[in-house]
Amino acid sequence: MNGLHEKNNQEGHAAGDVMLQAVAVAMAEAFGRENTFRFGGDEFVSIVFDTPRSDIEKRVEAVKKKLEDMGYFVSYGMAEKLTGGINSDRMLMEAEKQMREAKACFYSNPENSRCARLSENVNKSETL
């Protein structure tokens, strides 16, 4: 998720909880509740087996669109193992690397900059 920290600081933890729940529901609808897990403060993981990557990418885009329509934004990464044994640690590291790169790209946009949003909030509170 992008912006959970700011959401909690600006609107309170109840608003952050609503955001977390929205992401969890959207991912569970797309990938199945039994395959979707919260994996840290603002990170979720879905595990998918025997599904073409193109189908997974469509599901991810549907999740992103649904959340964007609600005013929430997510960054994601994907990893896959096509043959042989599964090294889940390595796959998680690869997906997390991609997610962090996507998140950095999201925040590099001045409109999404954490510094700009924090400065904006300080300026608002100074005028109140």
Image (cartoon, grey):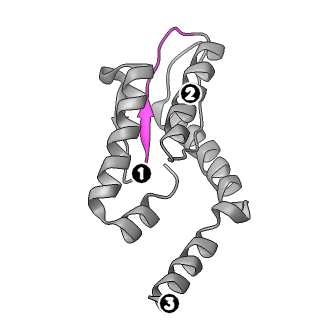
Label 1 Cα neighbours within 10 Å, binned few <14 / some 14-19 / many ≥20: some
At 55% from the left and 21% from the top, the residue drawn is 59
Helix, strand or loop at disc 2?
helix
Q: Quadrant of residue 53?
A: top right
Pointer 3 residue: 127
- Please tell me whether residue 46 belongs to the stretch shown in magenta: yes
The mark nearer the N terminus, 3 or 1, is 1
Q: Main secondary structure of the magenta part?
A: loop
- Cα distance, mark 3 to mark 2? 41 Å
Q: Residue furthest bottom?
A: 126
Q: Residue furthest left?
A: 14
The mark nearer the N terminus, 2 or 1, is 1
- Please tell me whether residue 121 belongs to the stretch shown in magenta: no
- Cα distance, mark 2 to mark 1? 16 Å
- Residue 82 pos. (x, y %): 61, 14
**Relative to residue 15, is residue 49 depicted above or below?**
above
User: In front here: 59 or 82?
Assistant: 59
At 56% from the left and 25% from the top, the residue drawn is 62
The mark nearer the N terminus, 3 or 2, is 2
- Residue 41 pos. (x, y %): 37, 54
- Cα distance, mark 3 to mark 1? 31 Å
- Residue 103 pos. (x, y %): 62, 52
Pointer 2 residue: 60
Tell me the number on the disc at residue 42.
1
**Relative to residue 119, is residue 55 depicted above or below?**
above
Q: Quadrant of the C terminus?
A: bottom left
Q: Quadrant of residue 44?
A: top left
Residue type at mark 3 is: Thr
Q: Please give the count of numbered marks on the rendered protein.
A: 3
- The magenta stretch is 43-51
Helix, strand or loop at disc 3?
helix
